[in-house]
Image (tube, rainbow, N blue to C red):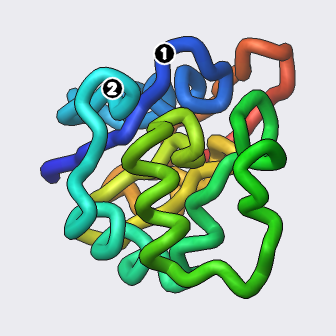
Amino acid sequence: MSITIYHNPSCGTSRNTLAMIRASGVEPEIIEYLKTPPTREKLTALATSIGAGVRALLREKGTPFAELGLDDLSLSDEALIDAMLQHPILINRPIVVTAKGVKLCRPSELVLDILDNPNIGVFIKEDGEVVNKQ
């Protein structure tokens, strides 16, 4: 199974998601989106595939979200994508793409829903939380 993760190695949720993918027996394609941001077309496609709209891909915490006024609900999807392209830190993570679907994996165990082999046994997240998927 081909898996792609839009990953930020500084994010614990992203690291946990990557570790769960690897525990399922797959080495994914890792796109560090802060270094290699997705294109406008890719962001639009990811938002469509997730099914929650462009706004669902926006990250508020630790970003210029408030300073840019992105809480304005009248902003168009194009304006939101423009902001994410200019400031990739605004893209929420991790986003995982598999043949079974696309998910924003927050919390990280949401990735198990789209893996071919979700039975990874007992998994302990970095914060000590136990995920038991057998």
Residue with the mark numbered 2: 32
- Relative to 95, residue 48 above or below: below
Q: Is residue 134 visible?
A: no
Looking at the rendering, which quadrant does residue 132 occupy? top right
Picture coordinates of residue 108 (x, y %)? 64, 42
Residue 128: image x %, image y %?
Answer: 84, 15
Residue closest to the eye, 113 or 64: 64
Mark 1: few, some, or many residues within 10 Å (few <14, many ≥20)? some
- Say what amino acid the circle numbered 1 marks: Pro
Quadrant position of residue 75: bottom right
Residue 24 location (% of width, % of height): 37, 36
Residue at 83% of width from left, 15% of height from top?
127
Q: Which mark is residue 9?
A: 1
Q: Is residue 62 left or right of residue 89?
A: right
Residue at mark 2 to residue at mark 1: CA–CA distance: 8 Å
Please indicate, yes or no, whether residue 95 appears anywhere in the rendered image. yes
